[in-house]
Image: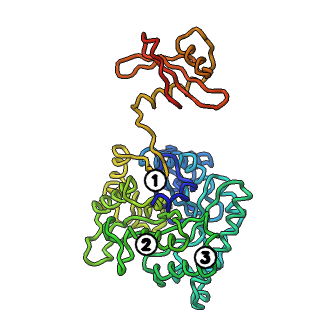
Amino acid sequence: MTTTYTRLAAYPRPPNDNGWGFHSSSGAYEQPWMSEAWRVRFSGKSAIQSLTDADKRHIMREYARMLHDEYGIRWFKLLAGGTAQLDFLDALVEAGIETIVRLWTDRPHPHYVAPTEVVQQFLEHGAHYIEWGNEPNLFLEWESTAWHRGNLEEQLLDQIERNLETITTAALRAGVQGIPLIPSLSPGGNRDARIMFSRLMHLIRERNLQSDFTTSAVAIHNRPHNIPPHEPATETLSVTFREYEWYDEQIRTTLGYSLPLLGTEAGYEIGDATIPGYPRITGDLHATYNMEIFRGFRETWHPSFFCACMWLIEIYEKNSFSFANAAWWYNKIAGGDYPENILPAVHALREEAAQRLFVRTMPWETPPPPASSFADILLAEANARQVIEFNPNAALQQRIFADGFVPNSPEFALEFEGETFIAQRAEHLQSGEVRVYYVKQGEWAQVKFIRG
C-alpha cells in the first residue's frame, strides 16, 4: 500500500492536516461579510452599506481564522466567479487552510477552458488545486447540442487535456505548483457516474495518455444521501461515502498508482431519505454521521482520500435560497428547529475540534517522537541555542573537541524527571554530523551524546 501511495507525498497538504473541510456558499460571488451574523461579530456593523473594503477583508480574515482555530478546518472548496474571490482566498491561505478553487461558469462542458491569467492569479495568491468543471455526467452541466451529440467521454477527455495544458502553463508562469483536477461526477447522474469514469480511464489507456496525469488530482462528490459513512460500496450501490475506494481502484488500474482524491462535496444533508431501507437524516444523525467522516481521517480512510469538504457551510447572501437546506450555519429551511438556525453538527464539530483534534499521519511520513521524550526535548533546546561560545576548559567542550567536533551553542541546563543535565550542541566541520553532548550535573566524567 505504501508503494502505491508514494507519489502522493509530492502533493501539497495544509499544516497540521486532518482532512476536515467545507464547501463554500453556493454562490460564486458570495463572501462571509454578506452574512449579518459575521458582520456583527467581526466588525460590530449590522448594515452592509456601512462596510468599507477594509472591513470586508477583516471579516474574511477573522472568519477564516475562526474556522481554523475553533472548528479545526484545514481544507476549503472555494467557488469563484472570475477573480472575485481572490481576497477571500487570501484570508483562507493566511489562516493555514488549503483551498481548492473551483472556477465557475454556467454549463462548462465540453467547451470551457480555464483562462490562464485567471488561474495564474489564484496560484500566485496561494491556491494549488484548480477545479474547472463540475459533474459532467449531468445534462444541466453541458451545452445541450454537445450532450445530444453523444461520445460524452471523448468530448470530456479532450476538454480535460485542454485544461491540463492551460493550468500547467499558468503554474509555470507563476513559478508555483498548480494541480489540475479531473472534475467530479454526480453520484448516479443522467449518465451513470461509474460508466462515465471507467470509460474515461479506458480512453486514457487507449490513447496512451497516462503520463499526462502524473501531477493531476481527482475531485469526487461522495455524498451518500442517508447511507451510513462506513457502509461499503457494492456493484449495485454507488452512492456511498466510501465510493472513493472504487475511484482509487480505477485510477490505480489505469496509471499504476494513486492520485489524490479530493472530496469537494462530501457528507450529509438534513432531511435526506433518498435510499430506501435507511433512516432519514435528522439533525442529530446529520451531526453523528458527519463527525464519523471527520474521525475516519485519523486512521480509517485510505491515504489517497485527502479531504472531505462538507456540503455546505452556509448561504452567505441573505436573499439566496440556492441549496439553502444543505447549510450547516444559518440554515434558512431546516434551521428553524434549532437555536439561531444553526444545525447540531456545528456544535458537534466545535466540540470535536476542542477535545479530539488530531494531525493525520500518512504512510510515507515518519511520526515525530513523543514530545515528552528526553531526546526530543534535548534536541529542541539545543537547536534553539545555536550560538558559538568557546570554553575549552569546560568538561563538555573537552569531550567535544576530543571527538573532533566544534560547539555551536552555549552550555544549557535541562530539567528532566527531577534531575538536572548540562548539555551543549556541536557539529563536525567536515562531515556535518550534529551531536548534542550532555552530562548529569555532578557526574562530569560521564559525558554522553545523542545524534541530531
- Give the numbered dot on residue 363: 1
Q: Residue at x 67, y 54 (%)?
A: 176
Horizontal and vertical percent position of residue 430 = 67, 29
Q: Which amino acid does the dot numbered 1 rest on? A: Pro
Which element carries disc 2, helix, strand or loop?
Answer: helix
Horizontal and vertical percent position of residue 125 = 65, 52
Residue 11 in the figure: left or right of residue 70 = right
Mark 1 and mark 2 lie on one chain; the one further toward the N terminus is 2
Residue 384, image quadrant: top right
Mark 3 and mark 2 lie on one chain; the one further toward the N terminus is 3
Q: Which amino acid does the dot numbered 3 rest on? A: Pro
Residue 152, image quadrant: bottom right
- Residue that carries the numbered disc 2 in the rendered image: 246
Residue 232 in the figure: left or right of residue 98 = left
Q: In which quarter of the image is the N terminus?
A: bottom left
* Of labels 1 and 2, the one closer to you: 1
Q: Which colour scheme is used?
A: rainbow
Distance in Å between CA atoms under marks 1 and 3: 37 Å
Mark 1 and mark 3 lie on one chain; the one further toward the N terminus is 3
Number of numbered discs overlaid on the protein picture: 3
Residue 108 drawn above or below residue 23: below
- Residue 260 shows up from this direction: yes
Name the residue furthest bottom. Answer: 149
